[in-house]
Amino acid sequence: MEHNKSFIYVIFGASGDLAKRKLIPALYSLYVNNLLPNNFAIIGVSRTNYTDNEYRNKMREALGKFNETNNTAEIEAFTHKLFYKSLIYDNSKSYNQLALRMGILQREYNISTNTLYYLSTPPDLYGTIPQYLATAGLNDQTTGWKRIIIEKPFGYDLESALKLKDELLKDWKEEQLYRIDHYLGKETVQNLLVTRFSNGIFEPLWNNNFIHHVEVTSSESIGVEQRGGYYDNSGALRDMVQNHLLQVVALTAMEPPASLEPSSIRNEIYKVFQSLRPFSSDDVKTNTLRGQYTASTLKKEKALGYREEEGVNMQSTTETYAALKFYIDNWRWGGVPFYVRTGKRLPTRVTEVVIHFKPTPHFLFSNHANCSSCNQLVIRIQPDEGVLLKFGMKIPGSGFDVQNVNMDFHYSDLTNQRIPSAYERLIFDSIKGDTTLFARTEEIIAAWKFLSPVLDAWKNNPDIPLYGYPAGTWGPEKADDLIENKDMTWRYPCKNLSDDGIYCEL
Ligand SMILES: NC(=O)c1ccc[n+]([C@@H]2O[C@H](COP(=O)([O-])OP(=O)(O)OC[C@H]3O[C@@H](n4cnc5c(N)ncnc54)[C@H](OP(=O)(O)O)[C@@H]3O)[C@@H](O)[C@H]2O)c1
């Protein structure tokens, strides 16, 4: 591989959980699948003092645990590309030493000055590190590209997101910034674009003439686990809706891009964000709902309530469930409600988009009105990834009774295809310089602007209730009232794509 494709990958926060569980395993997978050049180096950076060998040993251990294949020779070869440098984040000397170390590796291993800096540290350092890198001249692109990859959260609210934007754009250009939203790295999220724009059969129906409403659900069966302290300062709206779910909405709702150029796709995504109808204070009362899980018994075992979880304030009002109804005010979606819900400690872990088509204008068959969940297209993002179409068919026998039937495709049927992990795909794209699947500054700001009235009201308006829901249920019952048609409800998905219902086997 040529010299100009070689690079150094610097991971800040390299001793942390994300580096161990996701980043190093993803880089290793790219390496064993021959997707990296011969000449590259990875430098782990954090405050802890490790030697190169100590860091390599830690990462060997992590690869043994978190990687799907376990080839000792390949792990050995890969870990020899790993180096470590301890650093004090707000000390210029530390960055000068890092620059020296990078220079030595570049010369020793014939590596160009192309460099990626991955920020996997606590978020309050996302502004600091890029500024110090720039002061040390480590953003200079004269002889090779320099890119920064930033983990979520991109700010805590609109004000902090704007501050971070200013800090980043002071010394770096927008095209050097890669904000990772691992949802966009998922094959099934990208498949939203392919399902829509490679088929003549869906797109003509993909508008307010034929679609009654769109539902996006992302549920988790687990609670906050060991992340109670972090989560209690965040909540479902910040943790899931502001980033992942609004991105999924944008891919579902965007216009066809003029081409597959990153800027072309990102422009269309941004237009959706621009068209989101702002929440008025009345909308927040009627079209949003928050909940928090309470203790219950699950499979004969006690499940803790949120306020009993480690690291959580006993009087916490942080939402572990959020449901929103909103509109996208443009020609395609005028009048079509979008319903988005997410929560922890729900019955199962599922992420999916459900397109609910309008019913027929006239019910011809005797029990047709019962077919409220007929005519749904379900795009399952995880698990049992696939696509399901539900429609009415005649029940065999006399008369014309209608029943709901399924036509489904499961990704698992593509048996010989290896699906790369989301981090693998996104890290590979960042090395190639493909920004398509990374969020632009303006999208982030637009998403915070959109959710600000909800965040403010949920924080400051005591009249807005926080509903309890027993752990293991589908959230507050009141969420059903958000759906305006009395014959329609949320879909209650089961683990298997084709099944649904409150009582499904979980
Ligand atoms: N873990 C995930 O699955 C996940 C998913 C999405 C986003 N994220 C985001 O990715 C980032 C890293 O996540 P993580 O789970 O790896 O975090 P982590 O394990 O808690 O911390 C990462 C590293 O940051 C350093 N650190 C901790 N506290 C610090 C402080 N006060 N000042 C400076 N450095 C400090 C630690 O290294 P030293 O003490 O050696 O410096 C630690 O190894 C976070 O911003 C998180 O929100 C994580």
Image: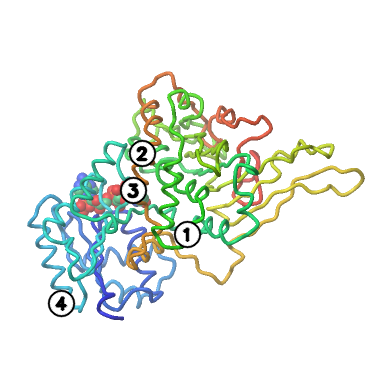
On whether ligand 1 comes within 8 Å of the CB at mark 3, the answer is: yes
The label on residue 178 is none
Which one is in front in this view, the residue at disc 1 or the one at disc 3? Answer: 1
The residue carrying mark 4 is 107
Q: Earlier in the sequence, mark 1 or mark 3?
A: 3
Picture residue at 62% right of the left edge, 41% below the top = 491
Q: Where does residue 322 sit, x and y in percent of width and height? A: 47, 34
Q: Is mark 4 within 8 Å of ligand 1?
A: no
- Which color mode does the image show? rainbow
Q: Which residue is mark 3?
A: 152
- What crowding class fits label 3: few (fewer than 14 Cα within 10 Å), some (14-19), or many (20 or more)? some
> Which tag, 4 or 3, sits closer to the chain's start?
4
Residue placed under numbered mark 2 in the picture? 448
Kind of residue at badge 3? Lys
> Is residue 448 rendered to the left or right of residue 121?
right
Say what secondary structure mark 3 lies in: loop
Disc 2 or 1, which lies upstream in sequence? 1
Dot 4, crowdedness within 10 Å: few (<14), some or many (≥20)? few
> Which is nearer the eye, 148 or 79?
148
Depth-wise, is mark 2 or mark 1 nearer the camera? 1
Q: Residues under labels 2 and 3: Cα distance?
A: 13 Å
The residue at the point 54 percent across, 38 percent down is: 339
Quarter of image, res 159: top left
Give the Cα separation between the discs numbered 2 and 4.
44 Å
**SS assignment at label 2:** helix
Q: What's the residue type where badge 2 is placed?
A: Trp
Query: Mark 1 = which residue?
Result: 258
- Residue 334 location, quadrant: top right
Task: Classify 143 as above or below 317.
Answer: below
Most foreground residue, 184 or 68: 184
